[in-house]
Image (spheres, rainbow, N blue to C red):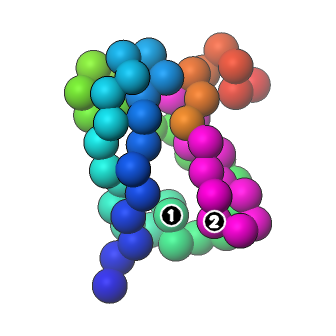
């Protein structure tokens, strides 16, 4: 069964669902484009599997 997480875009504030392997892996970051407005963001995943969506200019 694939895991899923609800994400709120930091640019347009719309919600969408992320599915699959980046959420099942260990802590880290990955780049992702909003599925609604296509604005780039960084998804940061911690050791507990919690995550935060950040705009690119705040992530690095």
Q: Specify the segment rendered in magenta.
A: 39-52
* Residue at screen point 32% across, 27% down: 14
Residue ID for mark 2: 49
Looking at the picture, how far across and down is residue 51, in whole percent? 61, 51
Q: Quadrant of residue 46?
A: bottom right
- Of residues 31 and 50, the one nearer the viewer is 50
User: Badge 1: how crowded within 10 Å, few (<14), some, or many (20+)?
Assistant: many
User: Badge 2: how crowded within 10 Å, few (<14), some, or many (20+)?
Assistant: some
Looking at the picture, how far across and down is residue 3, in whole percent? 40, 72
Residue ID for mark 1: 23
Looking at the picture, how far across and down is residue 45, in whole percent? 65, 54
Disc marking residue 32: none
Circles 1, 2 touching at the beta carbon (< 8 Å) = yes
**Measured along the vertical axis of the image, is residue 22 above or below residue 40?**
below
* Residue mark closest to the camera, 1 vs 2: 2
Residue 17 visible to the viewer: yes
**Label whose residue precedes the other's in the sequence (1 or 2):** 1
Q: Quadrant of residue 38?
A: top left
The quarter of the rendered structure image containing the N terminus is bottom left
**Measured along the vertical axis of the image, is residue 19 above or below residue 16?**
below
- Let me know if residue 44 is in the magenta part: yes
- Of residues 13 and 54, the one nearer the viewer is 13
Looking at the picture, how far across and down is residue 9, in whole percent? 42, 28
The quarter of the rendered structure image containing the C terminus is top right
């Amino acid at each position: 069964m694939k895991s899923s997480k609800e994400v709120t875009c930091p640019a347009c504030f719309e919600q969408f669902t992320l599915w699959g392997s980046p959420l099942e892996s260990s802590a880290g970051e990955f780049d992702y484009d909003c599925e609604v407005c296509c604005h780039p963001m960084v998804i940061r995943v911690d050791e507990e599997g919690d995550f935060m969506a950040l705009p690119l200019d705040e992530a690095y």
